[in-house]
């Protein structure tokens, strides 16, 4: 189940402030347009899409109850084997970084960087020290350190074989620590190495290779232009005999004409299996500046999440820009933010109020990210510990019918948006593509499988809150129900708080506020009509009960800011 995010100033603009990309509070209001049915169905469609992409392995999806299986009144012990001890034995490892005050400061700097400038007649100094706002061209080589302290280069961690990267310092574009680590550096402090594309490789060379194969842990190795230091220590990282294979070989030579198996050595249990190894070029000379960085826990490459890494950097050029001073005038004149927009935030100035806004938004984003990470980890772990004896056909059919209805609606919306016809793109083809199944496979069987998994997880949830004694009381359920209905209505309403917040005249502001409340109430009624009261009631059960179940589990938090 998706956990609904509460609206913030940032959410209204569409992107939350972060250390990577700052966002000023939006002053715009949304247009009043008729609500398309697809938009109101979007809540459900979005949940189903997430469920499908996750292959039904994590999270719970609450479908609207029509007629059929009643999860709240059924004797679920007939279908699910579970005890409180099972929940208590759920051990979760959650990887989320806590926001810090440094992230708040970085957010403000990035906002200033977006408005960098060069006064007319400003003199160029090609060897000026790098500062926030500098536009630099640079090369880099990234690596981590092995247990023995040797460099381990990672795929995509170097651009030395291509064109230099362009980077504005302070923009938050690169991983944490990278841009900050360049401040004060002059281009003359580094020297770009020479690239040599022929000759024989010798011990001590820095070589860029293409390599394909398999790691002893079963992971595929497929790296192109990967730098390595040609020393005997390579064998500990890439297998015994790797160093000897490369030393004395020709650059550009394909070193394998058959599969090569190398023992993993002391640091790896098992063998490396290589199908291709080729030295592309080596580097000669050069002087670098090393920067220590940190890959955040939400980094795309999972193997690098939370890892300390180093980059050897070579600066080709540096163009210095000036930054506007971060004061009240910057917010009112440059960004066009009315003081009233930040009136509810603590601080003696607009700058401090904005920092409070960013601080609170980052904290809220952290809570939401933490909840989602716990949710995914919880259901993944619980599925291994709980026995589902059988899933009633009626329970599966509820999900199946609901999903097929929304799959059809998604298909119609897609045809319209892409200006296609059913003849050109038949429903069966769309369904297979959408569900990511092979041609010839039955999409109906796949939908039934997903529906059965969803019904199974839903039974587990309702039985878990029953046996663990965390069912909400009538008053708690009512409060949770009203809260979730309000949040859904606010997310789908045509108006948000900015509709009335920026109005200075008290009378007009009150009138706009009442219009906003009326719009929210109207959206509530429409959502109830389309989704049904049971949908939000069951969602309320989930939001209340899931947090209680988490409290019974053992959770280990990893990431910046967690002890």
Image (cartoon, rainbow, N blue to C red):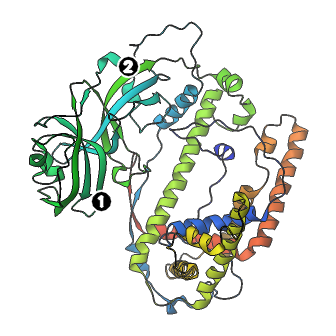
> Residue, x 41% and y 46% (percent of image)?
296
Position of the N terminus, as image quadrant, is: bottom right
Residue 343 seen by the camera: no
Badge 2, how many Cα within 10 Å: few under 14, some, many 20+?
few
| Quadrant assignment, res 260 | bottom left
What is the x, y in percent for residue 498?
76, 43
Contact flag, marks 1 and 2 (Cβ < 8 Å): no
306 versus 492 height, above or below: above
Badge 1, how many Cα within 10 Å: few under 14, some, many 20+?
few
Residue labelled with disc 1: 220
Residue labelled with disc 2: 184
Residue 448 seen by the camera: yes
> Residue, x 50% and y 82% (percent of image)?
467
Q: Nearer the viewer, residue 299 or 504?
A: 299
> Residue, x 52% and y 69% (percent of image)?
436
Judge left or right: residue 21 versus residue 559: right
116 versus 7 height, above or below: above
Q: Earlier in the sequence, mark 1 or mark 2?
A: 2
Q: Nearer the viewer, residue 497 or 143?
A: 143
């Amino acid at each position: 189940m998706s956990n609904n995010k509460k609206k913030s100033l940032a959410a209204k603009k569409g992107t939350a402030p972060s250390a990577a990309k700052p966002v000023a509070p939006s002053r715009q209001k949304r247009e009043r347009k008729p609500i398309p049915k697809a938009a109101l169905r979007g809540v459900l469609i979005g949940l189903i899409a997430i469920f499908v992409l996750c292959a039904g392995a994590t999270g719970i999806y609450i479908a609207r109850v029509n007629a059929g299986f009643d999860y709240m009144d059924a004797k679920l012990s007939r279908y699910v084997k579970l005890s409180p001890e099972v929940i208590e034995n759920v051990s979760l490892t959650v990887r989320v970084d806590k926001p810090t005050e440094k992230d708040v400061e970085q957010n403000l700097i990035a906002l200033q960087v977006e408005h960098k400038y060069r006064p007319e007649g400003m003199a160029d100094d090609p060897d000026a020290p790098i500062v926030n706002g500098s536009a630099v061209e640079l090369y880099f080589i990234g690596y981590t350190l092995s247990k023995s302290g040797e460099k381990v280069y990672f795929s995509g961690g170097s651009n030395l074989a291509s064109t230099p990267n362009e980077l504005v310092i302070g923009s938050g574009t690169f991983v944490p620590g990278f841009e900050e680590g360049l401040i004060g550096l002059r281009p003359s402090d580094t020297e770009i190495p020479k690239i040599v594309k022929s000759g024989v490789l010798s011990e001590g060379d820095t070589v860029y290779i293409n390599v394909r194969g398999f790691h002893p842990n079963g992971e595929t190795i497929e790296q192109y232009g990967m730098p390595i230091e040609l020393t005997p220590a390579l064998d500990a990282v890439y297998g015994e005999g790797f160093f000897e294979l490369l030393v004395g070989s020709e650059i550009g030579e394909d070193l394998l004409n058959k599969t090569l198996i190398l023992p993993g050595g002391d640091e790896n249990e098992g063998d490396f299996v290589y199908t291709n190894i080729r030295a592309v070029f080596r580097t000669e000379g050069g002087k670098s500046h090393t920067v220590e960085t940190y890959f955040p826990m939400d980094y795309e490459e999972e193997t690098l999440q939370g890892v300390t890494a180093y980059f050897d950097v070579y600066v080709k050029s540096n163009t210095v820009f000036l930054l506007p001073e971060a004061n009240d005038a910057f917010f009112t004149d440059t960004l066009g933010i009315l003081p009233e927009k930040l009136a509810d935030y603590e601080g003696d100035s607009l700058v401090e109020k904005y920092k409070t806004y960013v601080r609170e938004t980052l904290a809220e984003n952290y809570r939401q990210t933490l909840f989602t990470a716990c949710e995914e980890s919880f259901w993944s772990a619980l599925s291994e510990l709980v026995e589902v004896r059988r899933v009633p056909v009626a329970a599966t059919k509820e999900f199946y019918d609901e999903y097929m209805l929304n799959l059809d609606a998604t298909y119609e919306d897609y045809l319209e948006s892409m200006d296609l016809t059913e003849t050109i793109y038949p429903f069966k083809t769309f369904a297979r593509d959408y569900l990511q199944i092979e041609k010839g496979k039955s999409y109906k069987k796949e939908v039934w499988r997903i529906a059965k998994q969803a019904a199974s997880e839903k039974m587990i949830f309702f039985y878990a809150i029953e046996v663990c004694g965390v069912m909400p009381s009538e008053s708690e359920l009512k409060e949770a129900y009203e809260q979730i209905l309000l949040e859904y209505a606010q997310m789908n309403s045509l108006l948000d708080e900015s509709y009335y917040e920026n109005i200075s005249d008290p009378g007009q502001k009150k009138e706009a506020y009442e219009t906003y409340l009326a719009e929210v109430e109207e959206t509530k009624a429409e959502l109830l009509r389309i989704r049904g009261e049971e949908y939000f009631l069951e969602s309320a059960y989930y939001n209340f009960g899931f947090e209680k179940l988490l409290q019974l589990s053992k959770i280990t938090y990893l990431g910046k800011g967690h002890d």
